Structures are given as structure tokens and as C-alpha cells.
Amino acid sequence: MYHELDRRKIRFMQKKWLPVRIFRFYLEGFRSMDLGRTLWALILIKLFIMFVILKIFFFPRYLNQFDTRTEKENYVSKELIDRALNP
């Protein structure tokens, strides 16, 4: 059976915001592992590669060729209509 202190702790944890509980779940899990810091380092390196390096090389900035906001809006709307009509 749970002690009264354990029940209070469980009730307190249930009231916390869901992302906080998820973050703490992973944080405690990695803390108890021997390779926790190494795994966090690998995760951060992977995220850096995905969002910074790949964006630079594989996602060109098409809208930089236009000077005004109106030209950009016209280009985007034309592309959306063309791609919807001719998939």
C-alpha cells in the first residue's frame, strides 16, 4: 500500500501540466541510465543537423527573389492554385 506521502505526491504530479510531466519522465529516465548524458548529446546533435544543416542545403528560399510583399503573395497564391489544379 502507498503511504500518505506517496498519495500526496501522486496527486500533486497529476495536477502538473502535461508537457512538464513528459519532460520530467524522460529526464528521470535518462538520469537513472549510465549513458544518459551521451544519449542527450546525440539527440541534440541530431536535432541540430535536422533543423540547421539540412535546411541550409535542401530547402531553398524561393521567396527571396521577390522584392515586395505583394509579389511574394502573388507567387504563393499562383503556386497553390497551379499545384491544386495540376497535381
Image (tube, grey):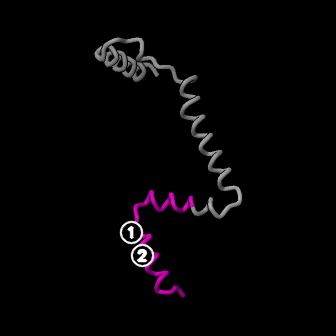
- Give the class, few, some or many, for how many residues have Cα within 10 Å of label 2's Cα (few <14, many ≥20): few
User: Residue 16 sits in which quadrant?
Assistant: bottom left
Classify 32 as above or below 57. Answer: below
Query: Please, is residue 27 above or below residue 85 in the view?
Result: below
Task: Judge left or right: residue 80 versus residue 30.
Answer: left
In the image: residue 33, left or right of residue 9: right
Q: Is residue 67 above or below residue 17?
A: above
Q: Secondary structure at mark 2?
A: helix
Disc 2 + disc 1, Cβ < 8 Å: yes
Q: Which residues are magenta?
A: 1-27
Q: Residue at 32% across / 16% down in the picture?
A: 74
Q: CA distance from mark 2 to mark 1?
A: 7 Å
Give the amino acid type for the residue marked by disc 2 in the picture.
Answer: Arg
Q: Is residue 22 left or right of residue 74?
A: right
> Measured from the top left, where is residue 12 in percent x and y?
41, 73
* Helix, strand or loop: magenta stretch: helix
**Residue 11, numbered label:** 2
The residue tagged with tag 1: helix, strand or loop?
helix
Q: Is residue 43 left or right of residue 22?
A: right
Identify the mark at residue 15; answer none if there is no mark: 1
Q: Residue at x 65, y 64 (%)?
A: 32
State the residue at coordinates (51%, 61%): 24
Farthest front residue? 37
Q: Nearer the viewer, residue 59 or 29?
A: 29
**Mark 1 neighbour density, 10 Å: few (under 14) some (14–19) many (20 or more):** few
